[in-house]
Image (cartoon, grey):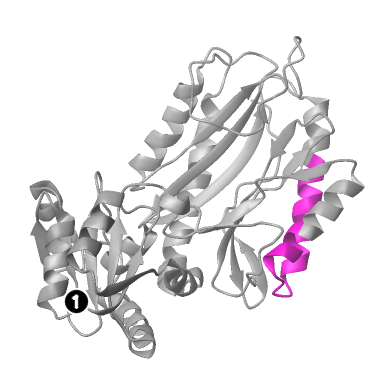
Amino acid sequence: MYLSERERDRRYDQLREIMVKEDIGAFVVVGNNCVGGTTGTGSFRYLTDYFMIFSYGLLIFFRTEDPTLFVGSDLQHVWASRYSWIHDIRVSPDLAQLAARLLAEKGLTRGKIGVVGMGSMPAAAYLSIKERLPEASFFDADFIFFGIRLKKGEAERDLLERAARINDDAYKEVLKHIRPGLREYEIVGILEGYHRGRGSDQTFNLISSGPFPTSLEGIPFQGLPWHPGIREIREGDCILLEMTTTYGGYWNQLVRMVSVRKQNPEVIRFHRTALIGLEAGLKEIKMRAKTRDLVQSVARATEKEGFALGLPMGHFAGLDVMEGRVSPDSDVVLEPGIAVVIHPCVMNAQGVRFLWGQTYFMTDDGPVKLNQSDDALHVV
């Protein structure tokens, strides 16, 4: 769909070297339409350059032979045949049965078989395959793919940059339209329409709105965004936007807050602290620091301003919007080729949260900001 056969061959060769070294006979790779986290299936797209629009699929990736893709409908078969890297595509209402039969036909009734996307695989499918291949040794192989996928090449960077441009322009567009009287779902509709209209194949946008830091009734601002609701925007509100979209499967995230009709002095304090924290964190990771060092650096800078650093702090991004957390206990070294979303969660003593950030790409010279949106606290 988006990447060359040369890139496909590079990926396949790298993976097969690992399979030979570790004596792995095959991988069973799960695909679905989730956006990421423990149920994400970016590894499926990594090997197919294709994504499931509904239900799930199973890719059988062999050590020496071409892979086979099982899907559950003729619709998926037609479009996977047209757009994916896979030539052997089969349709069945029982993917697990076909997968087990194929593995047996290839002589893989014993030995190691890695399951990729264990958190996404239907339990019934996993148990069915295991029951049909009782002597095979199945294991969770997600860690192998995490290591391969974490560091992106130039072709992947190009797609990440394209997604960032679409997201930046969508933010500019929505700023033109926000006004009192709109509802949350209308604001998110503008974002998603812009994303889709510029070629995004997936879009995932969250929002939170209301008085900041608390309402007249003392209700704290919901600083963790959620699915757009029916709430009507009012003058004096603040709106938190978590704008997330893809191009070619590669995710970009941009997090901003805007004020409606008038500036809010409380928001200014939070915003200033978030930028100070970001600056401290980016300075830290110029030296290829561990992820936990980044978090600690942002936390120290935030605390100096009289706030605390809450969670979430960020996440690694790629073919899943969240390929791993930016957490205080992560030992992942921020090396060139890694794409990371950093959005400090500034929190006051009352637990009010403020998020602000964007996506970065690590290079030999340090982090490069993929998003070019300004850091201004806009009043609309």
Q: Quadrant of the N terminus?
A: bottom left
Magenta portion: prevailing SS class: helix
Q: What residue occupies the far bottom of the structure in this picture?
A: 21
In magenta stretch: residue 293: yes
Residue at the (38%, 90%) spot, across then down: 21
Closer to the camera, 30 or 174?
30
Residue at the (81%, 52%) spot, across then down: 299
Closer to the camera, 321 or 165?
321
Any part of residue 201 in sight: yes
Q: What residue occupies the far top of the structure in this picture?
A: 217
Q: In the rendered image, which residue does mark 1 sit on? A: 109
Residue at the (15%, 81%) spot, across then down: 107
What amino acid is labelled 1 in the image?
Thr
Closer to the camera, 71 or 252?
71
Residue at the (32%, 54%) spot, across then down: 121
Quarter occupied by residue 234: top right
State the extent of the magenta-drawn residues as a range. Answer: 272-295
Q: Locate residue 147 relative to residue 50 in the image: left or right.
A: right
Q: Locate residue 1 relative to residue 107 in the image: left or right.
A: right
Across and down, in percent, residue 146 comes to 47, 68
Across and down, in percent, residue 4 comes to 28, 73
